Image (cartoon, coloured by chain):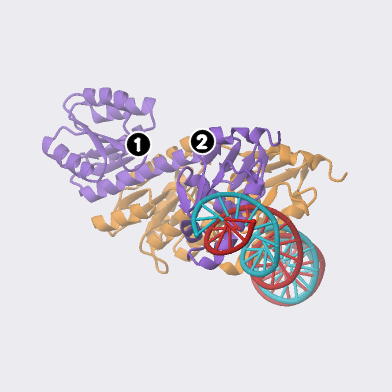
Chain colours: A orange, B purple, C red, D cyan
Amino acid sequence: MASFGATILVVEDEPELAGALERSLVAHGYRVLSTGSGEEALTLFTRVHPDLVLLDLLLPDISGLEICRRIRAVSSTPMIVLSVKNSEHDKVEALDLGADDYVAKPFGIAEVLARIRVALRRMERQNDQAAEEQVRIGPLVVELGSHRVLLNGRDIALTPTEYELLRIFVTHRGKLLTRQMLLQMLWGAASHDRMHSLHVYVAQLRQKIEPRPTEPRLILTIPGVGYRFSDEVEAARELDSPEP
Amino acid sequence: MASFGATILVVEDEPELAGALERSLVAHGYRVLSTGSGEEALTLFTRVHPDLVLLDLLLPDISGLEICRRIRAVSSTPMIVLSVKNSEHDKVEALDLGADDYVAKPFGIAEVLARIRVALRRMERQNDQAAEEQVRIGPLVVELGSHRVLLNGRDIALTPTEYELLRIFVTHRGKLLTRQMLLQMLWGAASHDRMHSLHVYVAQLRQKIEPRPTEPRLILTIPGVGYRFSDEVEAARELDSPEP
DNA sequence: GGCAGGTCTCAGGATTTCCTCAAAAAAGAA
DNA sequence: TTCTTTTTTGAGGAAATCCTGAGACCTGCC
C-alpha cells in the first residue's frame, strides 16, 4: 500500500511504449503488471488489486472507457488515462467516467511519474486514516498483507476465492453487502449464474471460521438482500468456546 | 462540501482569463472567490477554507509554487495549477509540491471543469466514508448503511418488506404517506389488491417496534388517508418503559 | 342500537429464498 | 500425463417470507 513499492497495472497495447513505461516504473521502485488486452486487465485487476492503473484508451478488445467504468464500479483505485485521443471531449468523457487524470500522448515520462506520485500520495494520505494491515474480530485475525488468517492463533487454510470473500467482508465489516455487490467484487461481472457459487462460498467460509456454522455470528445473512460481516467483538466473543 | 455549490478560490492575475473562469464556474453552480494577488490568496484561503483552489503559477507578488507549498503545509484541499510554463520540469515541480493537477495554458474550459469535478468527486467520496447514515427516533435507530434496526440498543429482526416499509417511514418521517404512495413505493404498481397486505405489514412492524402495538406512537394511522411516522422524540420517549 | 366502511389481528399454507451435502468439471501442481 | 486442489453445478431439504382469509374491532352515521 505504501507509495514506495506500490503495484501498478499498465494497460497498453503498444509494446514499445509498454516496455518503456514498465522499465521506468520498475526503476523507480514500483512493482509492475502489464497487459495489452482489456479483458486481461479486468481479470488482473480483480485478482491482484493494484494500487494504481495506467490505462490506454485504445485497446484491441474492450474500449478503455469501458474498463474505466467497470473498475470504478467496484473500486476507487486511482486510474490515469494515457491517450492519443486528445480532443477535449475525450478528456472530459474519461474524467467523468471515473479516471483520475488524463495525460495526452506523446508525454514525458517524468510527468507521468509525477502524476503517479500525486495519485499515490493522495491514496496514502487517505489510507492513513483507515490503514489496516491486520484486522481483528474477536479471535479471528486477518493479515491483509500476507494473506494469512488466524483463528485462536491457529492458521486457517483458505482457498483463493474464500480468502478474497473474507477480505471483502472484513474490509467492509459492519456494512451491508448485497449479493450483487459481492458478485461484482468477486468476479467482476454481476452474472446471476454465479449466485449459487456465492452461497456455497459463504457456507464454506462459515465452516472454516464460525464456531457453530449453523448459527453464524460473523457472516450474517440479511434475507432478501445479502450479508453483513459483524463488526462487534461482542458477537465474536463466544468463538473461544466452540461447544457448550 | 457537496460537489454542487462548492466554493472555489481562483488565483489568476490575468483579468480577462480570471473573468472567464469565474463566469463559467458560477454558471456551473459553484461559488467563486477570485484574486490576482498571491498574498490575498493565502489570506482568503485561511479565512474561507474553499473546497478547491485554481492556481496560476505566475503571479505579481509571490510565486504560485510558494502558495502551493504554504497551502499544502496546512491543508489537503485540492489544488489545480494552471500555467503557461509548460516544460516538463515545471509540471513535475508543481505536482511534487502538492498540486493535484496541472493544466497547460491555453486550455479548454470544459477540461478544467471536468478536472474540477474529478477533484471534488474524490473529496466527496472521502467524506462519505466517515459519515454513516443513521436515523434516530428516540430509542429507535435505523442504520441505513448496514440495514440494521436497533431498539433500545438491541437488534430487531425485520423481514425485507418490513425493513423497506420502515425505511420509507423514517426517511419521510413527519410527513403524511397515503396508502397509495406506500403501495407504489413498496411494490411499484399501486394495485388495490395489496391493500390488505400493506395493513398486515404495518401491523407487523408495529408489533416489532412499538412498545404498545395497540396504542401506536410511531406509526400513526390517519383514517381514510394513510399513515404518518412520528418525528417527535417526545412521542417515542415512553418506549423505554414497555409496560406500566 | 344497527349498519357500513375502513382498519386491525391472528394464523396457516404457498412460495421464495437460502443452505447442505455431494459429485462433476476445471484449473494447477508434480 | 496424473494427481491434487479448487471451482462450479446439482438436487433436496430447511427456513424464512409473503400473501390471504376470516373475523374482531373501531368510528361515524342513520
Residue position for label 1 = B78
Tell me the residue at 28%/27% (across/down): B67
Give the structural element (helix, strand or loop) at label 1. Answer: loop
- Chain containing the residue with disc 2: B
Label 1 vs 2, first from the N-terminus? 1
Q: What separation in Å lies between label 1 and label 2 (alpha carbons)?
A: 41 Å
- Which residue, given by chain and number where applicable, does mark 2 sit on? B232
- Most extreme residue toward the left is B16
Q: Chain for mark 1? A: B
- Report which quarter residue A134 is drawn in: top right
Q: Position of residue A23 (x, y in %)?
A: 44, 50
A207 vs C28, left or right, is: right
* Snapshot quadrant of residue B20: top left
Residue at figure coordinates x 77%, y 54% from the top left? A207
Task: Check disc 1: other Cα within 10 Å, few if <14, some if 14-19, many if 20+.
Answer: many
The dot on residue B114 is none
Judge by depth and name the residue closer to the eye, A33 or A147: A147
Mark 1 vs 2: CB contact within 8 A? no
Give the amino acid at mark 2.
Glu
For the residue labelled by badge 2, is the local secondary structure a helix, a strand or a loop?
loop
| Percent position of residue B19, x then y | 14, 38
User: In terms of depth relative to the viewer, which is nearer, B46 or D19?
Assistant: D19
Q: Nearer the viewer, residue B81 or B232?
A: B232
Amino acid type, residue under disc 1 in the picture: Pro
Q: How many marks?
A: 2
Image position of B206 with respect to B200: above or below:
above
Asked if marks 1 and 2 fall on the same chain, the answer is: yes
